[in-house]
Image: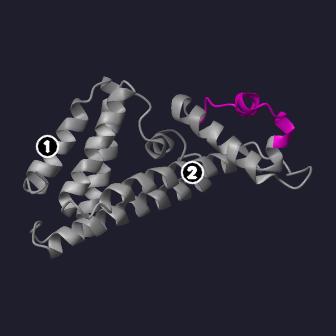
Amino acid sequence: MEKQTRRGPKPNMQMREKLIEAGLKEIHANGFAATGIQKIVDDIKVPKGSFYNYFDSKEAFGAAVSDRYSEQALARLVGFLADADKPPLRRLKAYFDDRVASFALRGHTQGCVLGNFSAETVDHSELIRQHVAAHFGRWSEVIAACLAEAQRDGTLTGELPAGTLADFILNSWEGAILRMRAERSGAPLETFKHMVFDVLLHGKAH
């Protein structure tokens, strides 16, 4: 991938944030390959050359965008799962209900940025692959902690470890999002919720 030597004055962190936010918007809408650096710098009105004061390459920029997306998504997930007014499985269902509603508002397009990177980029960029894999791992750990809490309070029974359940739920969710985009329909997401919460988790989230 394109790489240039970083040059110019000491990077301005505020400008770096603007580049990442603009890149996240473009990559989410159009994909990594179709997103050009020129469009991003034009959006925030800086010279293209200044981009390389902040990122050594488009690949490094993509990794930073994946970090930002994961940071935002993880904060949303943790916010739902930290709601002590609900039992753990209801918190988890509330999170997925919120995500399903959000995708509906966007016309069942765009999907998950990490999933999009996985489908489009990770075979060609080891750096981005490592970042995406680490982010998925953290998401799974947070879900596993919620499931472990449900196991401790007795609302979730069975012999499967919380980590195994969490990995399966996250994998199924990402697959459902891909089907959602292909079909431009929320039906795959509703099937996901039914199979996870009514079958796998025995309807204990209602």
Q: Secondary structure at mark 2?
A: helix
Rendered-image quadrant of the N terminus: top right
Mark 1 neighbour density, 10 Å: few (under 14) some (14–19) many (20 or more) = some
Pinpoint residue 98: horizontal percent, then vertical percent. 30, 42
The disc placed on residue 194 is: 1
Pinpoint residue 52: horizontal percent, then vertical percent. 81, 46
The disc placed on residue 172 is: none
Give the residue at the far bottom of this rendering: 152
Which residue shows up at 12% across the image and 66% down it? Answer: 156
Mark 2 neighbour density, 10 Å: few (under 14) some (14–19) many (20 or more) = some
Q: CA distance from mark 2 to mark 1?
A: 30 Å
- Viewer can see residue 52: yes
Q: Is residue 147 magenta?
A: no
Give the residue at the far right of this rendering: 8
Q: Is residue 125 left or right of residue 89?
A: right
Pinpoint residue 113: horizontal percent, then vertical percent. 48, 42
- Viewer can see residue 172: no
Which residue shows up at 34% across the image and 45% down it? Answer: 174
Toward which corner of the image does residue 87 lie, by quadrant?
bottom left
Boundaries of the magenta span: 32-50
Which residue shows up at 70% across the image and 42% down it? Answer: 19
Pinpoint residue 185: horizontal percent, then vertical percent. 28, 25
Which residue shows up at 47% across the image and 58% down it? Answer: 135
Q: Secondary structure at mark 1?
A: helix
The disc placed on residue 68 is: 2
Residue type, mark 2 in image:
Arg
Mark 2 and mark 1 lie on one chain; the one further toward the N terminus is 2
